[in-house]
Amino acid sequence: MSKIVEGLKYSESHEWVKVEGGIAVIGVSDYAQKEMGDITYVDVPEPGDTVEKGVEFGALESVKASSDLFSPVSGTVTEVNEALCDAPELINEDAFANWIIKVEMSDPSELDALMDAAAYSELVGE
Amino acid sequence: MRYYDKLIFELSKKGRTGFSLPCNEYGRHVSELPSELKRSSSPELPEVSEVDVVRHYTNLSQMNFGVDTGFYPLGSCTMKYNPKINEEIAAMSGFSSLHPLQPACTVQGALEVYEAMDKALSALTGMAAFTLNPCAGAHGELTGLMIMRQYHISRGDFGRTKVIVPDSAHGTNPASAAVCGLEVVVVKSNADGRIDLADLKPLLDDSVAGMMMTNPNTLGLFETEIIRIAEMVHAAGGLLYYDGANMNPLLGKVRPGDMGFDILHLNLHKTFSTPHGGGGPGAGPVGVSEALRDLLPVPKVVREGSALKVVGRAGSGDETPLSAGEVSAFLGNFGIILRAYAYILMLGKENVRMVGPLSVLNANYVKECLKDSYKLPMEGVCKHEFVFDGLIDDGASKAADGQGATTLDVAKRLLDFGFHAPTIYFPLLFHQALMIEPTETESKETLDAFIDVMHRIAAEAAENPAVLREAPHGTPISRPDETTAARKPILKWNG
Amino acid sequence: MGQFAYFPHTDEDISLMLERIGVGSLDGLYSDVPEDCLFKGVYDLPEAMSEMEVRRHFEALGAKNSKLKIFAGLGAYDHYAPSVIQYIVSRSEFLTAYTPYQCEISQGTLRYIFEYQSMICMLTGLAVSNASLYDGPTAAAEAMRMSVACSPKKKRVLLSAALLPNVLRVVETYARYYGVELTLVEAEGGQTSRAALERELAPGDVAGVIVPGINRYGIVENLEGFADLVHDRKGLLIEYCDPSALAVTKTPAEWGADIAVGDGQSLGIPLCYGGPYVGFMATTDACLRKMPGRIVGQTADKDGKRSYVLTLQAREQHIRREKATSNICSNESLMALFVTVYLSLMGPEGMKRVNDLSYAGAHYLHDRLLSTGKFAEAFDKPFLKEFVLKPLVPADRLQEVLLSGGYFAAVQTEEGYVNFCVTEKRTKAEIDAMVSIIQEAEL
């Protein structure tokens, strides 16, 4: 049974979004983390890069798999969680405490199309 | 096999040498090079004696399994016996001492091998002409796709940028397509494990450059609708590409050219018996139909009367306007071509007819003998290989922790019994895929021994899956920590 | 059926196996194949030969090739390969092994690749190396693509016109289909022009620049300041090098290059009419994840024993499919073993001696050729084992005379120069004999 945090927005590709002012803090769900197994590398964009809703912005790698990360919102990357470069396992330890990128949203209304915790919980069958 | 724990660097002792070279009698020295062009300090290569080197690498070799050690039921890899005469031929100084740029008149023997190999492969596949320049299967595949693109470009048809690839394809297919600037479109398999024609039809429009297939496919099943598929692809203006990784069951029985394929690559290190060398060198000749002959890469070997020559070398001024270009340093992995040609001569026109049938016989025999212990998702006659979807009883119900044995565990346990593992977790259509290909060079006795062990492993799994999950037990190392290897990569010796 | 050494089946085996399968005949195993697809004709192939006949056949073919004393380079070098190499690489445990995916029974292969990677890092000075690529030119093409992968918004790569012809041509082929625009940076006075490089970099749209360490004229290039120019424009500097020479010449790392590529043939691999050779690639930690090909890493097994595995596989084609950094699967593993054994035997001192003998012989030949009056200096620039001269006599005729004397030398280049190369395998007596042929010939 994976953990789902109330109050966050979720995408169908298992990213979560926490809104802090005009900034979207983005990570992956506990469910996604469990599906991947031991994460060995997090491929992330650089601050200043633009991301687009539904388009890949990076990837998670395990020993035998790779899974693309899709941005739940459009905008400009303001910050990248550098800690994940040296310690990708942080996502396995706590997927919600360890965000991946922060994005200054160009269209906050995109958030409306995302799921709330209850809908996401239904999606992953829990 | 026995564990040996040294790296060559750890045997090094300052002042020791393993070389023997003549004296410098010229009175000139490399120290004359201007200092701004010299490296600041010597590379820290090991300093070891000749006997240190021989013992070290002999010890390393004893931690390795090869075809000469035992049976490899490795699906899609065609690990057949590597005849020893081939090695002697490749080492003959009449070939091994030739510089690749020597004038044609001084290498007629080598060019004859090239020409004869082109003809032999054409005869065996039903294609019109081959290039032997690509150095490996994936390299041949890339070259073949370049020819495919070149065909459309040469006709002024610039909009064909998509290539159709089945969902069961080898991973290289989509990767090669992407490297060739083609967009991959996936066509689904139907419930029989073959290409779904209904899914294919709408994909075939004027943006399609062609379609890549293996036949038999990665499930070991012959694509029975192949003639229809070829017609559909051609009607849409595309070309049909044959991934020769699975050619072995067809050798001597079915020719890709007769099935309607326009371009193909072969893996000489699979179908034509050259050794895998622990991951290369291989060779990936590419054959084409008559219409595509002029698109083959340069340089190429051509006959002019009684002499052979090489055309299209850089700087030669030869006109080869349609050629897809140069894809490797010279004329490919000549040493591998020699070996494969020796194999073809040993086989001859009659024995070659038995290669495919005996490989298919072996595969079906193993499949029938094991399907009572392993899940067989596709019934019926297979070709050179087949896929099980894991154990019928993985032992989960008896295990204290409720965890059964997986395909990985079966593979690792096989190592304890002196067999290589099958290909696992491929194709991706099944979660516990275990893909087995016994080639024609394996005897009934070898297969029976393998079948016995596979039954024994299945019985062990049902009783106590932990034995499998801890396997291998008798190899030089146990399962290594691959996660740490990827998270904190150590990729060189750091003293 | 007749007996054949590579088929172990007896007629009885075949019947028993068919019975177990439940199929009446071998043909029955192909009942799913449409009739139209079955080949009913006769293969246009020779009759089977016995091993003795095959041997004789190849001996006859080999005799149609001329064994020449090689005084030519241009990307393939006649260096000496110590006896130990052939002895080790012929061990069937190395030769007949598959790719080391089952690491528990492949520690031999994995460990020598780890040693190979370490040695390539020692020669280039760079941080990481892969397990090998096909050959030098395709390694350069992979580096071209890698530079584009490192700055995905740029689609232009610069190539020095002084690179070897086959390197230029292979990179051009790969770039054409991948969709990368290439621009040649001209050579001036036998070296990559710094001014032309600056000019081409100016628009800021260049992902990578490929320059030779030792170029097509044999000249050891001075790359001082190149890296700064390229890095200022956020591109990667790629150096194409002869790894044998790197034992004495400035390293790619010292020049500030981000990627080093080249052909390892000069490290103990026979000429063998052009292959199999081995491409090498080394790069910085920063570019590691974009490097194509297999990589071996060190780890420990469950009991803490030092172990080696294929690692960072999530970059590769069998996992990432169309998103992989390259389509490469097979590398040239056994050829990497040639290189590893060679470098182990030679060590730092042996490599210095090889370069010393090659340098000394080449300079001796160079001066003697000039003294014949039949050549003029093409460039007055530092070279190592290979150089070009302007022939003052007809070059075709010159090569013919040399061939009939048993020498492969004076290869004509596109520019009308002739190439000579001397390795430690050539003796002073051979050089003197060849020069006197040139001296005496009526050209």
Image (cartoon, coloured by chain):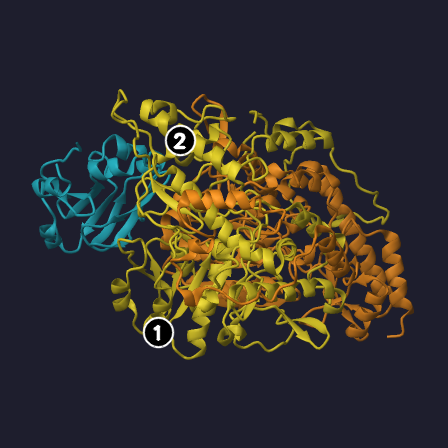
Chain colours: A cyan, B yellow, C orange
Horizontal relation, residue B145 to residue C342: left or right: left
Vertical relation: B379 (above or below) B348: above
* Amino acid beneath label 2: His
Q: Tell me the residue that label 2 is attached to.
A: B455
- Which residue is pictured at 39% across the width and 55% down the height? B217
Q: Nearer the viewer, residue C374 or B428?
A: B428
- Which residue is pictured at 86% across the width and 75% down the height? C443
Q: Secondary structure at mark 1?
A: loop
Q: Chain of mark 2?
A: B
**Percent x, y of residue C249:** 66, 48
Residue C59 disc label: none
Instruction: Please tell me how crowded label 1 is: few (under 14), some (14-19), or many (20+) other residues with Cα within 10 Å.
Output: few
Q: In what quadrant of the picture does the C terminus of chain B appear?
A: top right
Numbered circles on residues, count = 2
**Percent x, y of residue B69:** 57, 35
Q: Tell me the residue that label 1 is attached to.
A: B159
**Percent x, y of residue C323:** 36, 53
Q: Nearer the viewer, residue B401 or B47?
A: B401
Front position among marks 2 and 1: 2
Horizontal relation, residue B137 to residue C262: left or right: left
* Amino acid beneath label 1: Gly
**Percent x, y of residue C3:** 62, 49
Q: Would residue B270 be seen by someone viewing this image from the given angle?
A: yes
- Which residue is pictured at 57% across the width and 57% down the height? B352
Q: Chain of mark 1?
A: B
- Asked where in the image residue B226 lies, by quadrant, the reply is bottom left
Q: Secondary structure at mark 2?
A: helix
Distance Cα–Cα, label 2 vs label 1? 54 Å
Which residue is most to the bottom? B156
